[in-house]
């Protein structure tokens, strides 16, 4: 959540007061706090205290009610109603009027437990936003502009397609040691899956089909590697390729491809939406986004480049505005319930791909 905190400082400036840092690892929390106190943001952390648990923080802060809690703990510590993995429920019990800004994915636990958490948050009226920042874009909300264009032209999308190609020299070839969804700690497929759902709507989960290329297969052998992969058990390695297809409940089709094959240190990322006569293509959403629009009957596409794009700041600035009641709750584009649906899609992709891989064995 480092970028979130940086954006928070820029947005709130002298209004920001970080009053508590909750972490079971006191030495790590203290080191992080010391770094902040030695930075230009020191004024925001002057009254901050470190606590091992939410309950202890609540007992020590009876006279203060935080406005926002940044829930940046690892996904195994949140998103469920299982004791010890129920950070959101602990927070709303301790600070009933506090809004929650939750890191993605919402959890690494069972999907049904996530829905039970969502039910509690809804009943308590807790404002929750989840950090799927690509829905917001940067200084100009590119995805929302595309959605408005589709709506105003009375279009119905037929296809969303997302591709993410991290380089093989980046440390993406090690994998899960816990039973978590498809590459959740890397988050990128989840981000693009979420952007896909933002345009395509709800997914008919039984329709998800996925295939993989595994590291031991001939196409999966790479000439450039960051480390000796033989040190990692085969079952704990990321697939070199995961390709998934699904049907949206509205009738359109979605695809997502995640391939680890390029050399170097950069991502190659594209997202497209096709509708009647139109193609919207977003390139490099994590760097300098470029939006290419092909319109009916026009040979040349419109190209818009967005420099100094900061989706983290745009997302958090929007959330702060809602907390301060300067904007409607509708402006929180990634609600907790909606983020669970993205989480369910990542699980469906993982299960389908592993089932397919097992059938080839």
Image: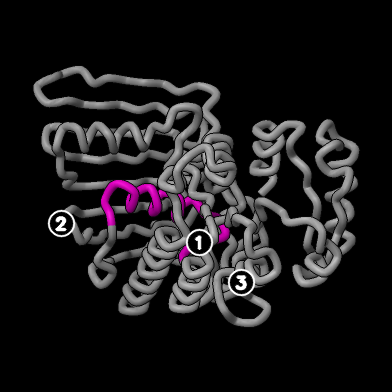
What element does badge 1 sit on?
A: loop
Q: Which residue is mark 2?
A: 251
Identify which residue is drawn at 61% across, 62% down. 229
Q: Are marks 2 and 3 in contact (CB under 8 Å)?
A: no
**How far across and how far down the image is residue 307, in percent?**
50, 21
Q: Which residue is mark 1?
A: 183
Identify which residue is drawn at 55% across, 70% down. 79
**How far across and how far down the image is residue 154, in percent?**
14, 37
Check the image and report above or below for 179 versus 248: below
Residue range (magenta): 182-201
Residue 205 is covered by the magenta coloring = no
**How far across and how far down the image is residue 319, in percent?**
54, 44
Q: Left or right? Give the position of 180 relative to 56.
A: left
Q: Identify the mark nearer the N-term, 2 or 1.
A: 1
Q: CA distance from mark 2 to mark 1?
A: 27 Å
What element does badge 3 sit on?
A: helix
Q: Are marks 2 and 1 in contact (CB under 8 Å)?
A: no
Q: Which residue is mark 3?
A: 89
Quadrant (top left/top right/bottom left/bottom right) for the C terminus: bottom left
């Amino acid at each position: 959540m480092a970028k979130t905190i940086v954006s928070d400082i820029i947005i709130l400036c002298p209004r920001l007061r970080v009053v508590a840092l909750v972490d079971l690892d006191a030495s790590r929390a203290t080191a992080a706090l010391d770094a902040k106190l030695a930075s230009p943001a020191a004024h925001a952390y002057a009254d901050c205290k470190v606590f091992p648990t939410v309950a202890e923080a609540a007992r020590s802060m009876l006279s203060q009610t935080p406005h926002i809690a940044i829930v940046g703990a690892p996904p195994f510590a949140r998103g469920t109603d299982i004791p010890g993995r129920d950070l959101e429920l602990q927070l709303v019990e301790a600070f009933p009027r506090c809004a929650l800004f939750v890191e993605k994915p919402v959890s690494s636990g069972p999907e049904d437990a996530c829905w039970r958490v969502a039910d509690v948050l809804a009943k308590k009226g807790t404002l929750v936003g989840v950090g799927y920042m690509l829905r917001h874009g940067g200084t100009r909300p590119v995805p929302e502009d595309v959605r408005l264009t589709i709506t105003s032209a009375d279009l119905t999308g037929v296809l969303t397609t997302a591709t993410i190609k991290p380089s093989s020299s980046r440390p993406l070839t090690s994998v899960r040691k816990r039973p978590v969804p498809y590459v959740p700690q890397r988050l990128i497929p989840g981000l693009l899956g979420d952007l896909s759902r933002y345009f395509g709507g709800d997914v008919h989960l039984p329709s998800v089909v996925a295939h993989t290329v595994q590291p031991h297969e001939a196409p999966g052998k790479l000439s450039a590697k960051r480390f000796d992969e033989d040190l990692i058990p085969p079952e704990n390695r990321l697939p070199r390729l995961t390709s998934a297809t699904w049907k949206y409940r509205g009738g359109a089709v979605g695809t997502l491809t995640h391939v680890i094959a390029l050399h170097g240190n950069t991502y190659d990322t594209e997202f497209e939406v096709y509708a009647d006569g139109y193609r919207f293509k977003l390139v490099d959403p994590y760097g300098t986004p470029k939006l290419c629009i092909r319109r009916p009957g026009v040979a040349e596409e419109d190209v818009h480049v967005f420099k100094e794009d900061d989706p983290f700041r745009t997302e958090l600035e929007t959330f702060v505005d809602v907390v301060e009641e300067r904007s409607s709750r509708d402006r929180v584009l990634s609600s907790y319930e909606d983020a669970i649906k993205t989480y369910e899609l990542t699980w469906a992709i993982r299960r389908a791909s592993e089932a397919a891989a097992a059938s080839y064995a």
